[in-house]
Amino acid sequence: MSESERIKELQEEIETLRTAFDSSYDGIHILDSKGDTLYFNKACERIEGLTYEDARRKNIRDLVKEGIYSESVTLKVLETKKACSIVQKVKNGNVVLATGTPIFKNGKIDKVIVNSRDITELNNLRQQLIEKEKLTEKYKEELRILRNESLKDSHFIVNSQEMKKIEALCSTVAKVDSTVLITGESGVGKGMISKYIHNKSSRRDAPFIKVDCSAIPPNLFESEVFGYEKGAFTGAEKSGKIGYLELANGGTVFLDEIGDLPIHMQPKLLRAIQDREVVRVGGNEVIKIDVRFIAATNRDLKRMVEENKFREDLYYRLNVVPIHIPPLRDRKEDIIPLIKDIASKINDKYDMNKIISKDTIEIMMKYDWPGNVRELENVVERMIVTGEDCLSILKDKIDENVKIADYRNY
Ligand SMILES: Nc1ncnc2c1ncn2[C@@H]1O[C@H](COP(=O)(O)OP(=O)(O)OP(=O)(O)O)[C@@H](O)[C@H]1O
Ligand SMILES: [Mg+2]
């Protein structure tokens, strides 16, 4: 190879290297042993916010003095004679990971090669991740508290024959996954029974999620219960949202006030119960769920079916094991144990020690409790807390004087 050919080849090689250096995404900064710049690629301008001319004109010590760099990896390399890395914030606000490597000649440092990488975005992402993790922890904790709150309920008082039969039936159905339909007047303990079944089942450590069909606005029902994919509708959370049914995976879904389920949602819920599958709003992926369904209502679902207000197929899907809880007036043997339990709870709560008199209990045994156990709880709490007597609390409900007299003579 002739001399000129050799020079041409070298020039081509230099050209290739220069192109490679200039198009490198990372910054490459080459300095001599005094800290003067020999080479500074385009990425350095972007990352460090410094022009090539500035870097050429000034020694690295001046750049540090002027605050362009908070510290210098080059000076560290010159000092320690070893490769080292630092993370620093440069004047334009970027966070940069800079690694300096010494090049030796005759045992002395001849050059320092600094490779710099912009980790601002990485740092931001890391920060976002930390925040998201914190948020997830917070939600997990909230969920844990909510679950415990709803499950730690008072003990289940059972004394009457009717309730003993119900308790036995609950223990039996707790062992299987059959859908249960609990009916009964308001306040008889439908919510309580549903938790009792869950707590007795093998799903007890998994979520118990209550879907109150009367409380969720009909237009939000589908997205709340089935969840939605991102961008499913305006106002939706950006990332999409998991629905109650998926949230309950492994556990129990309690469909409270099922009689109030919006009619347009009935086919979709039927599919979820029948096939244990959900499709989120705006999505098309079929998601398998492993849940047990318990529904409750104080309405006459059979009649609603006859009046075409409730789908017949859904009714039969729900009514696999019916549990009807009789009103308190039809199982008066439960009243005294309930009063005792409620009174001791209230006394504990307010650090009191009040006793319900025998006379009062007799009156309470005679009353027909249209609001069932909930009403009984309210009356007992009011008596203990305010000291009012039972008849004055109930007088609006026992509106005829004759009746009051009747209670007094009891
Ligand atoms: N057998 C029972 N033992 C102890 N507490 C009971 C019992 N039955 C009901 N309760 C209590 O009575 C209150 C009402 O019960 P619950 O909310 O379960 O009734 P519900 O039938 O779901 O009423 P609604 O139809 O109004 O939703 C609750 O505070 C519950 O803890
Ligand atoms: Mg209820």
Image (spheres, helix red, strand yellow):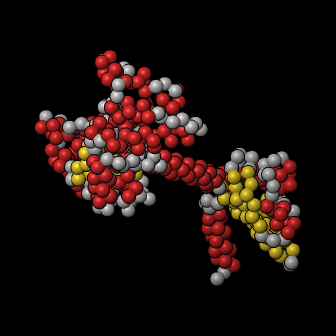
Q: Nearer the viewer, residue 219 or 82?
A: 219
| Along the line of sight, the residue nearer the viewer: 219 or 127 | 219
**Residue 190 percent location from the top left of the image:** 33, 43
254, above or below 5, in the image:
above
Q: Position of residue 76 (x, y in %)?
A: 83, 63
Is residue 156 something one can see in this rendering? yes
Q: Please state the horizontal and vertical placement of residue 339, each as a whole percent of the image.
A: 43, 39
Task: Locate the N terminus by quadrant.
Answer: bottom right
- Vertical position of residue 17 compared to residue 133: above or below: below
Residue sitting at the far top: 401
Residue at the spot x=65%, y=55% of the render?
A: 118
Give the x, y percent position of residue 365: 35, 34
From this view, report whether residue 8 is shown above or below residue 265. below
Q: Is residue 148 left or right of residue 160?
A: right
Direction from residue 170 to residue 267 in the image, left or right: left
The C terminus sits in image quarter: top left
Image quadrant where residue 20 sits: bottom right
Q: Nearer the viewer, residue 339 or 57?
A: 339
Q: Residue at x 73, y 51 (%)?
A: 89
**Front one among 408 and 241:** 408
Instruction: Work out which residue is located at the far left of the displayed protein and give it.
Output: 306
Image quadrant assignment for residue 203: bottom left
Residue 166 in view in this figure: no
Residue at point 29% right, 42% down?
331
Q: Residue at x 33, y 30 (%)?
A: 367
